[in-house]
Image: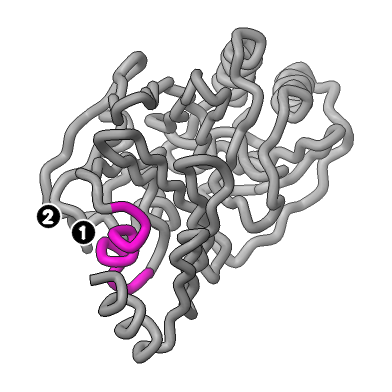
Amino acid sequence: MKKLVLILLILSGLSFSASSQDFQNSELTITKLEKNMWVVETADKTTMYIVEGTKKALLIDTGTKCSKLDSIVRLITQKPLSVVITHIHGDHAGNMNFFKEVYFHVADTVLLNRSNPYKGKINFVKDGFVFDLGGTRIEVVHMPAHTPGSIVLLDRKTGNCYSGDAFGSGQVWLQLRPHLPISTYASSCKRMEQLMDSGITKVYCGHYPYVKKAYDKSYITDMRKLAEAIVNGTAPESKPFETRVSIGCDKPVISTLGQASIVYDSERI
C-alpha cells in the first residue's frame, strides 16, 4: 500500500518522505516539528497544525484554498480525525467543507460565511473542553479579542499552545468586525501569561511561516504591555497602517513595543 501511495505521489508531482513524514506540493508544506506534531504551511503563509495521540489525531485550522486537504492530512495520519478551528476567518477556516464535522467557539458563529456556508456538523467548544487523543490531551481556552470566539489549544504535557491569531505572529490585528475593546485583548494576554507561569512554554502561532519558531512568555508580555499602553494613552507613537484587505477599521494604525505590534482603530480604543 505504501509503495502505491509513493508511486501516485511521484506521478502527481508531489513529494513525500516516508521517514520524516514531510510533504510538499505547490499549495502547502508539512513539516514535523516535534514528536507526533506537524506544522502545515500554505503558500500564502497561513498555518495549520496536526497533533497525533495513540488513538486519535487533531487538525487545528483548515487554512485557505488547499486542494484535497482531507486526503493530504491522511498521508500524515490514518487515525480518527477531529478538526478544530481557532477562529472563523477565511485564512483559518477556508477548507472546512473538506470535513464532515468541525469544532469552534459559539461566539464566532457571527463570522460564518453565508455565501459559502459550511455544510457539515458544527460542535461548539468552550473553556475546559478537552480533545482526548490517547496519551495526549488538547485543552480549549477562550481568548477573545482578535475575534469574539478566538480560542487557543493547550497541550500541557508538552508545554505547547496553538494560538491561531489570538496573539498574532509578531503583529496582531484587533478591532476587526465585530469590534471588541483593546482592554479585552489585554485581559487575554494576562490570562496567557498566567498559563505560561503554570507550565506552557511554547506558543505556536497561526502564521508560522513568518516566524519559523514558537514564541515564549516575553512575547506575550510585550503584547499585554502594549495593549495596556494603548488603552492608557501611553503607547509609542502609532503610524497609519496600510493594507489591501478590508479589516473593519475606519482608521487603522499600528503601534510597536518590543517584539509586539498591534493594528487597531484609532477611533475605537
Residue at the image point whose x is 61% and y is 25% from the top? 182
Q: Give how far across and how far down residue 78 sits, in percent.
A: 25, 53
Residue drawn at the location 35% of the way across and 91% of the way down: 11
Residue type highlighted by circle 2: Lys
Q: Position of residue 106 (x, y in %)?
A: 26, 29
Q: Are marks 1 and 2 in contact (CB under 8 Å)?
A: yes
Label placed on residue 248: none
Drawn side of residue 104 relative to residue 262, left or right: left
Can residue 183 be seen by looking at this rendering? no
5 with respect to 218 (left or right): left
The span picked out in magenta is: 66-77
- 238 in relation to 107, above or below: below
Q: Which residue is mark 2?
A: 119
When asked about the image quadrant of residue 86, the answer is top left
- Residue 212, given in percent of the width and then of the height, sits at 69, 52
- Pick whichever, 134 or 119, lies toward us: 134
**Which amino acid, by three-letter code, is at mark 1?**
Asn
Label of residue 97 in the image: 1
